[in-house]
Image (spheres, grey):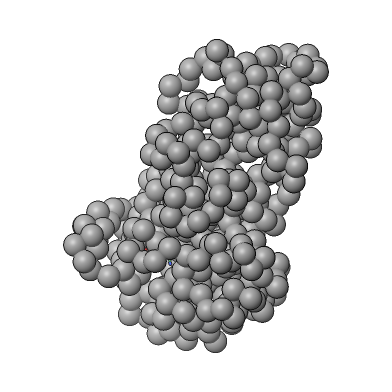
Amino acid sequence: MSTLITGIGELTTNAPDGPLHDAAVVLEGERFAWIGPARSAPAADDQVDIGGRAALPGWVDSHTHLVFAGDRTAEFEARMAGQPYRAGGIATTVAATRSASDEQLSANLRRHVIEAYRQGTTCLETKTGYGLSVPDEARSARIAAAIADEVTYLGAHLVPPGADAETYVDLVCGDMLDAVAPHVRWADVFCETGAFDEDQSDRVLRAAAARGLGLRVHGNQLGTGPGVQLAVRHGAASVDHCTYLTDADVEALAASDTVATVLPACDLSTRQPLAPARALLDAGATVALATNANPGSSYTTSMAYCVATAVLQMGLSIAEAVYAATAAGAKALRRDDVGVVEVGARADLQVLDAPSATHIAYRPGVPLTLAVWRSGQRIPTAEWPNVTG
Ligand code: NIG
């Protein structure tokens, strides 16, 4: 089964030569089979004319925490009234998550993933980290693996209340790792004052690497610290947050293959400064944008909101922000089959009800996603309009 999407006024492909105009693409099965000028498009089984609108790769959301139950509205309200965010609320979500059934966790994850798809996300990573016991982490990993594109083990999210930190790190590196490993590709550690220190984080990363997992780090979210340097030293695919960086951190990232993933929705929701994405790009680092969707520090699945914020408040151009939310997100997951529109890549495409991607920042907050294809399949969007004309 093939589908020709034609009448594309602006097609962002993420190729170095910039967007195409008056373009068309052919999706065949799960892949892009043809990309080029609309006037020379081949025939296909099915045809959709998007009437001069903009199309771009589906968003790659490389950082979410969506295996959870419960609600933290009260914590958010307290924060907006001046309480600082200290990550202690993770324990509230852990208690709610442990009390939920598998079916409830699964349904909640699915609901949020569909919410993300309808807004143009087509590749989504999610994490464990609200279980923090061997059975609860293992079931979180199993549930996530059935729904998300990429799954990360975050047993090292917080030392559970009442536990001894060193004993808990032994568990994270031992029995818990054994239990989750069949379901996950990645391991992560929250290297931050109040969570895991440098030595503990180093142990977690070593154990995960020895088990063959790829590495990610939550670093430099609430203050400067060793997270970024640790991630770079371990060759982690990504270090996420990067809100408080020293010049040495920026230089280390620029000289490495570790992607700096910034999470502006989280910075805003926790009343932190926005991560220095402009300085990272200027230094030569790869910067990805992700939502950090979770019930505590960043309860949004909107990549468009992150892109608009990156442009309006972080000094990125629209092209840089779109790249960060697509191709660079793919790099943060060490994938080259998503985040780009090229022949052979996964047929993940979003159509905006707008003539150019610039409108994502020019019209912030407006739900512009009109149609989404993921792996060549059209995702039912809210309006399900006929996009012709
Ligand atoms: O990325 N930093 C640690 N973990 C999450 C917060 C999760 C929560 O507050 O529930 C984050 O912001």
Where residue 180 appears, x then y in whole percent?
Answer: 57, 63
The residue under the point 74% across, 46% down is 16
Is 311 in front, or is 118?
A: 311
Picture quadrant of ligand 1: bottom left
Q: Quadrant of the C terminus?
A: top right
Count of labels shown? 0
Q: Is residue 300 visible?
A: yes
Where residue 204 appears, x then y in whole percent?
Answer: 57, 77
Q: Is residue 91 visible?
A: no
The residue under the point 64% across, 61% down is 286
Is 149 in front, or is 20?
A: 20
Relative to 151, is 45 above or below? above
Where residue 274 appears, x then y in whole percent?
Answer: 43, 63
In the picture, measured across the screen, residue 264 lies left or right of residue 3, that is left
Q: Quadrant of the N terminus?
A: top right
Relative to 316, is 104 above or below? above
Relative to 244, is 358 above or below? above
Instruction: Name the image quarter holding residue 350.
Output: top right
Where residue 38 appears, x then y in whole percent?
Answer: 73, 20
Relative to 267, is 198 above or below? below
Is 135 in front, or is 264?
A: 264
Is 323 in front, or is 34?
A: 323
In the picture, measured across the screen, residue 211 lies left or right of residue 360, that is right
The residue under the point 56% across, 13% down is 388
